[in-house]
Amino acid sequence: MGYYWAAIQKEFLLMSRDIHTILVLFVVPMLFILIMSLAMRNAFSEQQSLDIKALIAIQSTSSNSLEFEKQLKKNNSFIWQKVNYNDIKEKMAKDDVLIGIVVNKDFGVSTEQTPKVTLLIDPKITPSLEILLKEEVSQTIMKIEMSDTISKLNPWMTTEEKQELMKDKKLFNEVYVGSKSSNAKKPTSVQQSVPAWLIFSMFFIIIPISNTFINERRSGTLSRLATMNVTASNLLISKALPYMIINQIQLLLMLLVGIFIVPLCGGDRLVINGHFGLLAIVSFVLSIASISYALMISSFVKTTEQAVSIGGFTNIIFAAIGGIMVPLFVMPQFMQDLSILSPMSWGLDAFLGIFLYDASFEKLFIPLVALLLFGLSCFFVAIYKLNMQIKYQD
Amino acid sequence: MIVVQDITKSFDGSTVLDRVSFCIPKGSISGLIGPNGAGKTTLMKILSGLISQEFGLVSIDGDKLEEKSLRKIRKKIGYVPQSTALYTELSGYENLSYFGSILGIKNYLLNSEIQRVTDLVNLQDHINKRVSNYSGGMQKRLNLAVGLLGNPPILYLDEPNVGVDPHTRNVILNVLSSLQKQYNTTIIFTSHYLEEVEKICDRLIILSNGHVIADDKTESLLESFKTVDIVFANPLNLPDSDFNNQTQISFQYQKLRDIMPILLDNLNNNEILNIQYGSGTLDRYIEKLSQEKSI
């Protein structure tokens, strides 16, 4: 045990003196979580405005056109600014506004099936935003027409009665499956970003591991340790232990950022629906996978440059296909199928199970076993390679 | 005692050590010398159990160096590699503390052991500085200090003085001498500098192209290195000799007794202008011995 304790102390000392490693392992992922949680906030939230600027110009003089503008502004999706009809296209181009609406002259006058409004849409707009815009405009027009119809059919109705009839009614209940209670909230962006970027940063442990490992080999320290009766498996375990502790520190820091820092910056507070014990198990198994992978790469490459480029490249590919950078549900089916190749995706499955669904151990079993098998395979390959290097002094 | 018998090792089909044999008495300082590529480092790695030989055996204090006895034998060995195998971002103290813990030195003894080895290599004033701030010589001394941790009865040093200043070289050589005197440590060190091995070594083993070409006490070998250079006024007339038609000849001092009478008998109107005794060079000696042994 004395050997492992000495190795842990040595690795911590080395890391504490390497500012780049601290940045890569702790600061960069914390910033990523902060930025991505804030950037993706609206994509996950129904409560807040999308804060997208939009212009409205009214040609009609009818009272319904003013009611249309008023109703439209009640929705939180867009920030509407009223402009002159003649200026709307020019202002859209000048201010880089993607959406505009012109309320046509016969709005609220003609009942013919002619378009009531004209939508001005920049081609850069995303399809989902375009659907949202059309949905909001249709609903608002329908509300106004329905109000007109009620007035015509029931002329004796008081304004209060009409308002009561027109009031928005709750048509459905929302139950987020797997949550602890039926009162649980919709998943937030921070619940997606924390596990995703935590996994990414855990796999980036390859940078400090390969740095020290390759420097030790190059300087002859590994040979010296071998003459001190340190075996290849001793060496690799002594590398793995301190970095496992570092992975757990990363987990703690990322959780703290999600719970305390993101809300301070205007984002949602991180809520963990699952069990903390399971969270620790997932983090531990993920740590075995990421560290073993780093040790395997480090045992094969000759220089730190090779380790950084090969490790960095494979990590980015794992992240891209594993749903770290872009959530899996927005990917086409074949990309979602491809994610099975990424250990980061297995880790994300397990973490999301805890963060979002309060998953039981049985539900996490498959991703956990996959991660463990991946980690152990990498570890044994690394031991074999290191043994060969020591034996043949490669 | 270290016994090396018929050690053979090759890498990628080329033989690096070919039936190398010698004995190192307990408590002696032995110099393993030879030019670059002679096989010195490979031999050191075999002796410390880092790599295994294809043929032959090594025995240390009666224990055969093999897989099952490796742990026991390694406990007796201190190994100082050619490169400075240290953590440059740690201080000298932190390096010694780490390697001391790896060697299993108990915590309560560690500080006094670190003190002992730093005193030996004269690094007391710099022990808390980071190794990256050390000069090359200081790094070499710390590298040696790590090898001295635990006071091993056998010490292997692979070219400890390569690229060091004369002061550091003297410090290292003095440390080795005092280890032998104080602790009867058996020391083997490799070098390609004759002048440093002749100062402290009891015996010399000369390696060339993977063969032992000389293995003897230092004085005897140095004696055989000595040369005599004679300059004549006119070319020599010795048709049956290599010296025929030469005005300047050179030969080993050991052969003076055989050669001089022939020269004196054949001087005929010639005259010796100058006689000079030289210590010879390792390169010349190796070249000559290699030719004699057809290596």
Image (cartoon, grey):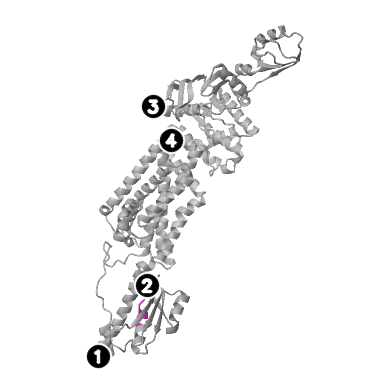
Q: Could you say which quadrant of the image residue B160 lies in?
A: top right
The numbered mark at residue A389 is 4
Q: Quarter of the image for the N terminus of chain A: give it.
A: top left
Q: What is the span of residues highlighted in magenta in the rendered image?
A: A70-75
Mark 3 belongs to chain: B
Mark 1 belongs to chain: A
Instruction: Assess disc 4: are there few (<14), some (14-19) or many (≥20) residues with their C-alpha within 10 Å of its C-alpha.
Output: some
The numbered mark at residue B68 is 3
Give the x, y percent position of residue A118.
Answer: 36, 80
Q: Nearer the viewer, residue A295 or B260?
A: B260
Residue shown at 31%/45% (left/top)? A373
Q: Are marks 4 and 3 in contact (CB under 8 Å)?
A: no
The numbered mark at residue A152 is 1
Q: Nearer the viewer, mark 2 or mark 1?
A: 1
Q: Please state which amino acid type lies under the numbered disc 3.
A: Lys
Q: Nearer the viewer, residue B254 or A240?
A: B254
